[in-house]
Image (spheres, rainbow, N blue to C red):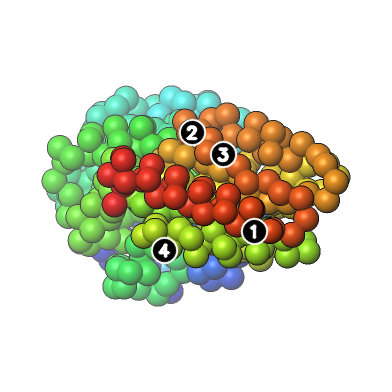
Amino acid sequence: MKPREIRPKVYSVGAIHWDARLFDALIPLPDGTSYNSYLIRGSEKTALIDTVDPQMEHVLMNHLNQLGVESVDYMIANHAEQDHSGTIPRVLEKYPQAKVVCTPRCKGMLTDLLMIPEEKFITVNDKETLSLGDKTLEFIYTPWVHWPETMSTYLREERILFSCDFFGSHLATTDLYVTDERQAYEAAMRYYAEIMMPFRTNIQKNLEKIKDYAIDIIATSHGPIYDKPEFIMRAYHSWVFDEPKNIVVLPYTSMHSSTRKMVEYLVEALAQRGVTVKQFDLAATDIGKLAIALVDAATIVIGTPTVLAGPHPNAVYAAFLTNALRPKLRFVSIIGSYGWGGRTVEQLAAMLPSLKVELLEPVFIKGLPKEADFKALDNLAATIAQKHKEHHFA
Ligand code: FEO
């Protein structure tokens, strides 16, 4: 892709990474991603907002060459993570007069991560402005959109918010703007679920803060740009402020079908009581789909067999991830089976200390499920349905 002009003298110069399949050696990227970078040419000064992952450095540098950029005065670093900051050293090498503009906390991180020298930095306060001549940048602190140092940059004259990870989506596309809102919604929800969900109260504050700004465009650092920003702002508002919904998430793993039979029975029992269930086989599932499902769920039920006297490692992974993501869950339960003994339920339940949840009576049985076990699953389904009703989770 060539550089593209978003507004007069404002260009998209980042890189599309079609083949990326894993982020942070953890997060699946089924649709690839992009590292967006933006060049703003003012009448007096030129600014570059964020860079790209170092493996795509050549794309950014080619774009700057194609636009004939002879000088960059300000290298705006909204965020220190290397998928956006990793090419800053190369930019400083090519444009030695450029100053890195960032929050004081970001300066510390860039010093640690990229060893950028002290004299290269200009730190900015919350809501401080920087003039490029006929264009004005305002820096708005938007911390904890998974790291603490992050800010957004607002271009006043064009009413563009460069929000970095905030509102972003891992989506490789040739479309500069969102054209398929359904696809963009799922990709943005995945991104929110995977990295921002634990910081929901900070995201609430950030949303409240940017409410005072007139925003025509949200230009993120991953995924297509929003030229109808109300769509993604509405989605975020619902994810962070709304009560959970009448949804049970049921991640499970099964070795010899006992747990699988219990899961299938419980799914049916819940569905008959009007509860929506999202079932995930942990041996095969895309962990991002599980994270998405957790955004609005009221209850999680983890299904596991007993391995070496404890929970199956797949179930441990799901419990660890859920605890780390701290979704809006209110209830948790555990179902599964054992052959001769173990401490599976205690061990798994102890892995969820960060969740503010009520533990509903687990159903943990010996061998294959029998009539009394199915009755216990019916009781669990009835309890969940009743709890959801009492809380008006719809
Ligand atoms: Fe896209 Fe937190 O970096």
- Disc 1 residue type (three-letter): Glu
Q: Residue at x 25, y 50 (%)?
A: 233
Q: Secondary structure at mark 1?
A: helix
Give the mark nearer the N terminus: 1 vs 3.
Answer: 3
Q: Residue at x 33, y 69 (%)?
A: 182
Look at the numbered discs 1 and 2 and tell me whether their residues touch, using CB distance below 8 Å. Answer: no
Q: Is residue 74 left or right of residue 135?
A: right
Q: Is residue 281 left or right of residue 247?
A: right
Q: Residue at x 22, y 62 (%)?
A: 227
Q: Is residue 171 left or right of residue 124?
A: right
* Residue 250 figure quarter: bottom right
Between marks 1 and 2 in the image, the one whose residue lies nearer the viewer: 1
Q: Which residue is mark 3?
A: 361
- Disc 4 residue type (three-letter): Gln
Between marks 1 and 4 in the image, the one whose residue lies nearer the viewer: 1
Cα gap from disc 1 to disc 2, whole angstroms: 26 Å
Give the mark nearer the N terminus: 3 vs 4.
Answer: 4
Look at the numbered discs 2 and 4 and tell me whether their residues touch, using CB distance below 8 Å. Answer: no
Residue 359: where, in percent of width, then height? 53, 35
- Disc 2 residue type (three-letter): Glu
Q: Secondary structure at mark 2?
A: strand
Where is 40 relative to 108, above or below?
A: below
**Of the numbered discs in the image, which one, if any, rests on residue 358?**
2
Between marks 2 and 4 in the image, the one whose residue lies nearer the viewer: 4
Residue 71: where, in percent of width, then height? 39, 50
Give the mark nearer the N terminus: 1 vs 2.
Answer: 2
Q: Quadrant of the N terminus?
A: bottom left
From the viewer's side, name the closer residue of 68 and 75.
75
Q: Secondary structure at mark 3?
A: loop
Q: Which residue is mark 1?
A: 371
